[in-house]
Image (spheres, helix red, strand yellow):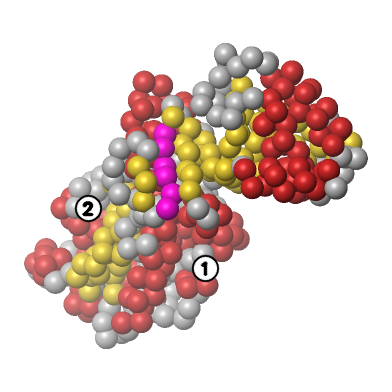
């Protein structure tokens, strides 16, 4: 009965907070504050807070930053966990019990965590950020461990415990971790600049987008369609994919570009085996124009070396020839199974496999050239009359939509 009364008492007194930790940002030296400020902005944006200074309150919870640690407090914190898991720049976070900085409260909080876990063995670990705290880390571990042993029948196991109870002594309060979570990692949104992704609607380009957003790029997207050969459903499919991605990378500006007239001209004037290569060259030129106007410093594609005929090394040499800005291909050395696994994890796979044709598959040659020579590709492309005017008209008639989380 005594043990039950303790749980009731402490369960009603403890406050919960979420502690968010940075990872790679620690390595940024004198630029670290820039990344931490960008991360703080991302956290506030994702949690639907007002863009105010440190320690603001809205929607029944508060976000504050102390040094390199970010704290979220308020009601129903468990509801925020799925959102926090998608914030790039956070390596790990924990739902923790916040207590006054004295050993009695720390012991009671640890007892609560152990009892909630229903573990048969435990271990205490302590991190002392406040070096002026009266007890050192080993002393805290010993006293907390002795208290839990005294109040329960649970044993200590320092080598293979059922639960490790983490305690942290910060400058203002002490925290005992209730549950820990892995964060999304990477770098905060926008800290690496802006990139334009060529979004086909298949499995690969959403994964490439995710991987480059994780490296701190803000994303803009371009989707090429071929009406009436491709339907509005193919565009809607891309929008739904971007909605999924926007929960990781924020809002995305989507350009929808019709390639119908250009591809008809390619079909009339170019060798069939080069249809796809020349189409992709023109897509690259259009994309680089959009990137220039939109302040994007690179293109992003979902190409994986050798996956299809247009992704052989000679083919990529041909398609990249006149781009003028870097092309990032984060999937270049990955197997399809690896790409699919990431697509499933980020929630885009089921949408990507829906059976809507893209612009490349409609005009795909029966026997594509897998080892094209740049010299002959350029000669074939030169047969298209007024190609620069066609590209300009295509750009002028593109449509723009903002995709929000």
Is residue 202 rendered to the left or right of residue 145? left
Which of the labelled discs sits on residue 291, or is there none? 2
Image-quadrant location for residue 278 = bottom left
How far across and how far down the image is residue 252, in percent?
30, 59
> Which residue is nearer to you in this view: 49 or 6?
6
Residue 319 shows up from this direction = no
Q: Is residue 53 above or below residue 262?
A: above
Determine the secondary structure under disc 2. helix
Image quadrant in which you'd find residue 162: top right
Residue drawn at x 80%, y 48% is: 4
Crowding around mark 2 (Cα neighbors within 10 Å: few <14, some 14 to 19, many 20+) is: many
| Foreground pick, 329 / 276 | 329
The residue drawn where x is 31% and y is 65% is 403
Whole-percent x and y of residue 103? 69, 25
**Is the residue marked by circle 1 packed among few (<14), some (14-19), or many (20+) residues within 10 Å?**
many
State the image coordinates of residue 217 (x, y, percent, origin top left). 35, 46
Which disc number belongs to residue 349?
Answer: 1
Seen as rendered, the residue at the extreme bottom is: 228
Q: Quadrant of the C terminus?
A: bottom left
User: Within the image, what quadrant is residue 28 found in?
Assistant: top left
For the residues labelled 1 and 2, the Cα–Cα distance comes to 27 Å
Q: Position of residue 53 (x, y in %)?
A: 30, 37
Q: Would residue 32 be visible to someone looking at this image?
A: yes
The range drawn in magenta is 60-65
């Amino acid at each position: 009965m005594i043990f039950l009364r303790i749980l009731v008492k402490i369960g009603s007194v403890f406050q919960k907070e979420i502690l968010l930790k940075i990872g790679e940002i620690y390595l940024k030296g004198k630029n670290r504050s820039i990344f931490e400020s960008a991360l703080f902005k991302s956290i506030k944006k994702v949690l639907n807070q007002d863009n105010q200074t440190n320690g603001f309150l809205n929607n029944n919870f508060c976000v504050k930053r102390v040094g390199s640690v970010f704290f979220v407090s308020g009601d129903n914190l468990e509801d925020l966990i799925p959102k926090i898991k998608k914030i790039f720049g956070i390596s790990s976070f924990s739902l923790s019990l916040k207590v006054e900085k004295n050993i009695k409260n720390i012991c009671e909080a640890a007892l609560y965590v152990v009892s909630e876990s229903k573990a048969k063995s435990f271990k205490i670990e302590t991190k002392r950020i406040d070096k002026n705290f009266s007890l050192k880390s080993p002393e805290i571990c010993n006293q907390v461990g002795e208290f839990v042993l005294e109040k329960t029948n649970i044993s200590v196991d320092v080598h293979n415990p059922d639960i490790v109870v983490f305690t942290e002594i910060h400058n203002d309060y002490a925290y005992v971790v209730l549950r820990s979570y892995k964060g999304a990692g990477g770098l905060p949104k926008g800290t690496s600049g802006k990139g334009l992704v060529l979004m086909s609607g298949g499995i690969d380009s959403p994964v490439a987008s995710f991987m480059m957003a994780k490296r701190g790029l803000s994303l803009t997207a371009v989707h090429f369609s071929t009406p009436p050969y491709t339907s509005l459903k193919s565009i809607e499919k891309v929008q739904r994919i971007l909605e999924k991605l926007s929960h990781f990378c924020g809002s995305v500006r989507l350009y929808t570009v019709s390639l119908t007239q250009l591809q008809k001209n390619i079909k009339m004037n170019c060798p069939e085996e080069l249809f796809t290569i020349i189409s992709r060259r023109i897509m690259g030129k259009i994309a680089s124009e959009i990137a220039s106007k939109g302040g994007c410093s690179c293109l992003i594609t979902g190409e994986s070396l050798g996956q299809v005929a247009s992704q052989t090394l000679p083919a990529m040499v041909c398609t990249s020839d006149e781009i003028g800005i870097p092309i990032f291909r984060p999937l270049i050395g990955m197997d399809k199974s690896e790409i699919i696994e990431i697509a499933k994890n980020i929630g885009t796979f089921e949408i990507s496999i829906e059976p809507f044709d893209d612009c490349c598959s409609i005009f795909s040659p029966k026997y594509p050239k897998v080892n094209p020579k740049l010299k002959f590709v350029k000669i074939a492309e030169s047969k298209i009359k007024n190609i620069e005017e066609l590209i300009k008209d295509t750009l002028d008639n593109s449509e723009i939509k903002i995709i929000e989380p």
